[in-house]
C-alpha cells in the first residue's frame, strides 16, 4: 500500500454511545513508530431534500458548536443498517417528510486524519409532509428555503456545517439545481 502504516498495537481508550476512541501504535514506512488517535464511528447519512427550487433545511442547537446551526437532515447509522433505510428513517423522524425518490449521490469521510466516519449523501425528491418524531433530546425546526438563498447562506458562511455545504455543492455539480443570478456574486 502506498505510504501504508502497519498497526503494531491498538488500544481502546474510550467507548461511548456514539463513538469510540482507539489509540494505534503504527510502524511507518520509514521504520519509525508513531501513535494515531482514531475516532471510531458507525457512519451516517445526510439528505438533501429538494422540493421544486427549495431545499429542506433544519435549524437546531449544536452543543459542540455552542450555537444553533443550519443543516440538512442527517443521522447515524444503526449497527448493520443499510444507508438507504437509514436515510428514509432519519428524513421521516427529523422532518416529518417522506420522499418518492431517494438517490445516493456520493459518500465521503468526515475527517480522514482522525475519524473512520463516512457519510452517505442522498438527494430526496417528491417530498410529502407527514408528522416528525424526533428523538427526545432533539429540538429541530424545519424550513423550506429557496436554493438561491441557501447558496447565499453558504457563501456568507451562515451555513457552517460541512455535510450541508457538500450536499448543496453536489446538487450544483450533478445539475440537480441551477443557481439563478449567482454568476456575478
Image (tube, rainbow, N blue to C red):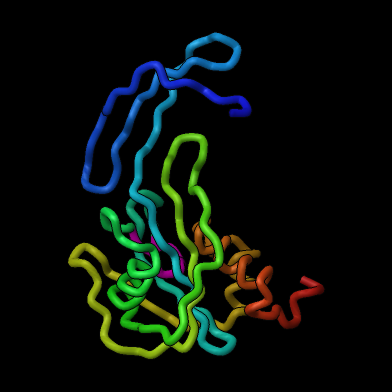
Magenta-colored span = 68-76
Identified at 48% across, 12% down, the residue is: 33
In magenta segment, residue 75 = yes
Residue 27 visible in rendering: yes
Residue 54 left/right relative to 129: right
Residue at 55% in and 9% down: 31
Residue at image point 35% right, 57% down: 62
User: For the view shown, which residue lies furthest in the left direction?
Assistant: 136
Report the predominant secondary structure element of the magenta stretch. strand
Percent x, y of residue 30: 60, 12
Q: Nearer the viewer, residue 34 or 7?
A: 7
Q: Tell me where residue 94 appears, x and y as whole percent.
A: 31, 73
Please tell me whether residue 64 belongs to the stretch shown in magenta: no
- The quarter in which the N terminus is drawn is top right
Residue 70, horizontal then vertical, whole percent = 46, 67
- In this view of the protein, which residue sits in the foreground, 17 or 138? 17
Q: How many marks?
A: 0
Quarter holding residue 54: bottom right
Name the residue nearer the viewer: 161 or 84: 84
Amino acid at each position: 500500500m502506498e505510504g501504508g502504516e502497519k498497526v503494531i498495537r491498538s488500544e481502546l481508550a474510550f467507548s461511548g454511545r456514539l463513538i469510540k476512541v482507539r489509540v494505534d501504535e503504527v510502524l511507518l514506512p520509514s521504520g519509525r513508530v508513531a501513535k494515531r488517535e482514531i475516532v471510531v464511528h458507525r457512519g451516517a447519512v445526510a439528505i438533501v431534500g429538494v422540493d421544486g427550487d427549495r431545499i429542506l433545511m433544519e435549524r437546531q442547537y449544536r452543543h459542540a458548536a455552542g450555537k444553533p446551526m443550519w443543516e440538512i437532515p442527517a443521522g447515524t447509522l444503526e449497527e448493520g443498517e443499510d444507508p438507504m433505510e437509514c436515510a428514509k428513517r432519519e428524513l421521516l423522524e427529523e422532518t416529518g417528510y417522506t420522499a418518492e425518490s431517494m438517490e445516493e449521490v456520493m459518500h465521503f469521510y468526515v475527517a480522514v486524519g482522525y475519524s473512520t466516519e463516512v457519510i452517505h449523501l442522498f438527494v430526496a425528491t417528491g417530498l410529502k409532509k407527514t408528522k416528525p418524531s424526533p428523538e427526545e433530546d432533539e429540538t429541530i425546526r424545519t424550513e423550506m428555503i429557496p436554493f438561491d438563498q441557501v447558496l447565499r447562506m453558504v457563501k456568507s458562511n451562515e451555513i457552517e456545517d460541512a455535510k450541508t455545504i457538500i450536499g448543496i455543492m453536489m446538487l450544483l455539480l450533478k445539475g440537480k439545481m441551477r443557481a439563478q443570478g449567482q454568476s456575478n456574486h
